[in-house]
Image (cartoon, rainbow, N blue to C red):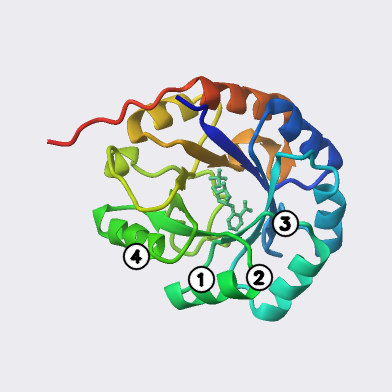
Amino acid sequence: MQDVRVKICGLTRAEDVAAVAAAGAAYAGFVFFPKSPRNVTPEQARTLALLAPPGLAKVALVVDADDATLDAITRAVPLDMLQLHGHETPERVQAVRARYGLPVMKAVGVAEEADLPSIGLYAQVADQILIDAKPPKGADLPGGNGLAFDWRLIAGKRWAKPWMLAGGLTPETVAEAVAMTGARQVDVSSGVESAPGLKDAARIAAFVQAAQGARAVPKLRG
Ligand SMILES: O=C(O)c1ccccc1N[C@@H]1O[C@H](COP(=O)(O)O)[C@@H](O)[C@H]1O
């Protein structure tokens, strides 16, 4: 069985890219959202993306970004994927895929069973789905809040597209999350930081090691 693939999101410094590459992560995420402590400009992201070794996929995370914003990001930064983390409709997902010719990962927030049909809906139009915790009411950020959801909600579930598990994962919890959900890909931001927006190389290494050592044993639902 293949290793669990890891995305480390919210890199802001050259040493973060080096730590992510050294740890063996598959994806490096850059956040383009001014309210986030991990926000980077297209120019900063370009500098960081150019440091990524071959095989480390560069992902741009945006929140309800318009075409002008996406044009500026995609022009400046060599990218492998776009992550839409706002209220983008299925039609907007399709339009972004067509305009930029990049794979699109759509984030879907989950807090209860009633949120699950959205995953199937977006799986029809996006290349990948990011299953994240729904942000608390009134939160400044639609993600990156270090909040987990009840993993039992998606245990043993299957969707038509590859998906990633996110939301409050840490080096200490990721193995259990993988075992419970059957995730083959995981994404983390807060859980590998020493302070908001400040990535910690030791926690990144520990996270990737714990995720790659984990084995999916999805619980069967009766
Ligand atoms: O990380 C951010 O600042 C962020 C801002 C706006 C939207 C999404 C954001 N992060 C994404 O959320 C998941 C979960 O984060 P966490 O591990 O719970 O902190 C993260 O992996 C990013 O893809």
SS assignment at label 1: helix
The reply to whether the residue tagged 1 has its Cβ within 8 angstroms of ligand 1 is no
SS assignment at label 3: loop
Mark 2 vs mark 1, CA separation in Å: 11 Å
**Cβ–Cβ below 8 Å for labels 2 and 1?**
no
**Near-viewer residue (18 or 127):** 127
Residue 117, quarter of picture: bottom left
At label 1, the amino acid type is Val
Where, quadrant-wise, is the C terminus in this rendering? top left
- Label 1, on which residue? 93
At label 3, the amino acid type is Leu
- Label 4, on which residue? 121
**Cβ–Cβ below 8 Å for labels 3 and 4?**
no
Q: Which mark is residue 79?
A: 3
Identify the residue shown where x is 64% and y is 78%.
66
Q: In the displayed structure, does residue 42 sit left or right of residue 115?
A: right
Mark 1 vs mark 4, CA separation in Å: 11 Å
SS assignment at label 2: helix
Identify the residue shown where x is 50% and y is 73%.
94
Q: Position of residue 5 (x, y in %)?
A: 55, 35
- Label 2, on which residue? 100
Q: Position of residue 23 (x, y in %)?
A: 70, 27
- In this rendering, the answer to whether 148 lies above or below 170 is below
Nearer the N terminus, badge 3 or badge 1? 3
Q: How many marks?
A: 4
The 10 Å Cα crowd at callout 1, few under 14, some 14 to 19, many 20 or more, is: some
Nearer the N terminus, badge 1 or badge 4? 1
The 10 Å Cα crowd at callout 3, few under 14, some 14 to 19, many 20 or more, is: many
Mark 2 vs mark 3, CA separation in Å: 10 Å
Identify the residue shown where x is 40% and y is 64%.
122
Q: Nearer the viewer, mark 2 or mark 1?
A: 2
